[in-house]
Amino acid sequence: MVRDQLQQLLVLFIFTLVNNTCLASPRTTEPKLILFTDITKSTLGRPIRVELYGISLKTKITNIKLNHLNKNFGVVVEYTINDISDKRWPNQSVQILKLKLYPRQTGEILIPRLSYNNVHSQKKIIRITKGKTGEPEIRLSADTPYERQQIIALVTITSNNSTARLSIKKNFEVNNFESAILPFKRLKKQNGTYQLQIGLALTALKSGRLKLELPAIEYSISGVSRKQFYLPAKSIYIKPLPLYLPPTIPIGKITIQSQLSHDGLLQSDSLFYWNIELNGNLNNAYSLPPILRQIKSTGHIKFLPITSERSLQATENSLVSTV
């Protein structure tokens, strides 16, 4: 009798232990990072939509650093969802970070794992092809320019649509460079395709080895955005200027034009106008030297002060400053 009671108690104990273990397993709070993508293949210029799930994280999901993504992708954060419930992870806090990733090149591109402390998401490979527009071609006017020397960066893309165009959003920045957008150009080729070109005039603000990251290039057809091209970063060496050159000296080609308002002989005690125009391949018209400070009156001729005008003129291949 006693033996039977002990067996029943032992069975009851084992049943209770197993039952509690089964109930506890869904309630685990072990943190996780899980990454989902909507596709595994895409074309250059089109986004990959990413959902990063944070399960029972000890921090906000927006605190996870995305720097590792920048090498292979242009990163656009769409929005976040905080502290929701999900049937896949019952009784746990779930956060979602939604991203759009724009590949910078073709081939097999790695989405690296994202981490917080010892919690990591999985790696993922995305295969990227050229598409009909091909890969953007980037050309620099100088491989090793001087500090404060203007560099022209031209981006060219091929299209088969006569209304296709390229543009750059105005609220962009290029680290370590002054920059200005050059006009868009479309050229029809003999094979019926169109060569699209847009560029930037850049001026390095310091010397040394710099990373040049151009802004995103938008490709649109009939005014509707179709693609966003995020370009690979380029390493460029900027040569330092000699120490004896003052910072007011413009670096680049300067031309001067001079003309008097009267073609014949000048008469004494009369007023004439001397028109002087300076042009230079500079991003800032105020970098041109001040002419009026260099013109002094003498006992034979008197120069009266006049207001000078400074302007910028952008062409398809250059940015010209004028005073």
Image (cartoon, grey):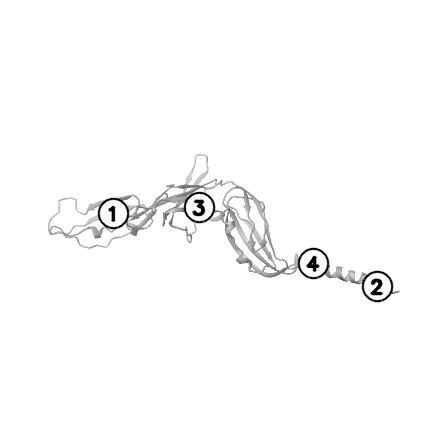
Residue occupied by mark 3 = 166
Residue occupied by mark 2 = 6
Q: For the residue marked with disc 2, what is the amino acid? A: Leu
The answer to whether residue 182 of the structure is visible from this angle is no
Left or right, 247 with reference to 274: right
Circle 2 residues within 10 Å: few <14, some 14–19, many ≥20: few
Nearer to us of marks 1 and 3 is 1
Nearer-N-terminus badge (1/3)? 3
Nearer-N-terminus badge (1/2)? 2
Q: Nearer the viewer, residue 111 or 15?
A: 15
- Name which residue lies at 25% across and 47% down: 277
Q: Which mark is residue 25?
A: 4
Q: What percent of the width, then of the height, locates residue 186?
A: 41, 42
Nearer to us of marks 1 and 4 is 4
Nearer to us of marks 2 and 4 is 2
| SS for dot 2 | helix
- Name which residue lies at 44% across and 44% down: 234
Q: Against 215, is 95 above or below?
A: below
Residue occupied by mark 1 = 277
Circle 1 residues within 10 Å: few <14, some 14–19, many ≥20: some
Label 2 – label 4 distance at C-alpha: 29 Å
Q: Against 95, is 180 above or below?
A: above
Nearer-N-terminus badge (2/3)? 2
Label 4 – label 3 distance at C-alpha: 55 Å
Q: For the residue marked with disc 3, what is the amino acid? A: Leu
